[in-house]
Image (tube, grey):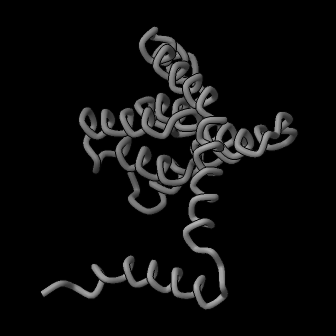
Amino acid sequence: MADFSSYVVPAVMLCIVLFGFLRSVPVFDTFLTGAREGLESSVSILPTLVGLVMAVTMLNASGALDLLSSFFAPAAHLLGLPHQVIPLALIKPVSGSGSTAVLTQIYKNCGPDSFAGRVASVMAGSTETTFYAVAVYYGSVGIKKTRHTIPSAVAGDLTACIFSALTVHLFFGD
């Protein structure tokens, strides 16, 4: 017998359609309009997304990520961050999938229960794909000037990186 949870999504969809019919909303036409607008938004932000993916791939393949990691290693050491998480801190604001690959590599090399693995886990969960989010959300509505968004978001990511090591120290004593 099927679990109750397998009926939740169809029940919600049915409720939405019934609500629309009760309100005399042309449900199918409204759905098509929304789908068309979603597709137009996707097409409009596609060049930005391709640029971000290409930049991350080039950064990683060229060895620049390793070079940047070694450059920031002394500062990370002063902040209590293990050197293994520096690539994650650098790639996370740009690419979610790239940061997942780096996180997986940290788990593979250090182990998920190591200090570096725990710091990487906290960091991955508490930082944002800042540049990706700004590109997608601002690009979809045509905003060109981000003003204080990027500096504020990067400051938040930096704070999360620093506090990820502190949090692991406090909770696990590593």
Residue 145 percent coordinates (x, y): 86, 35
Q: At 17% across and 84% down in the image, what residue appears?
A: 2
The number of numbered badges drawn on the structure is 0
User: Looking at the image, is 60 positioned above or below residue 89?
Assistant: above
Question: Foreground: 27 or 137?
Answer: 27
Question: Foreground: 18 or 118?
Answer: 18
Q: At 47% across and 34% down in the image, what residue appears?
A: 88
Residue 39 percent coordinates (x, y): 58, 45
Q: In the shown orientation, is residue 113 left or right of residue 138?
A: left
Residue 83 percent coordinates (x, y): 45, 29
Residue 132 percent coordinates (x, y): 61, 38
Q: In the shown orientation, is residue 143 left or right of residue 171?
A: right
For this orientation, the residue located farthest to the bottom is 22
Q: At 58% across and 85% down in the image, what residue appears?
A: 21
Q: Quadrant of the N terminus?
A: bottom left
For this orientation, the residue located farthest to the left is 1
Q: In the shown orientation, is residue 14 left or right of residue 161?
A: left
Question: Foreground: 136 or 14?
Answer: 14
User: Looking at the image, is 23 positioned above or below residue 93?
Assistant: below
Q: At 56% across and 16% down in the image, what residue appears?
A: 71
Question: Foreground: 78 or 97?
Answer: 97
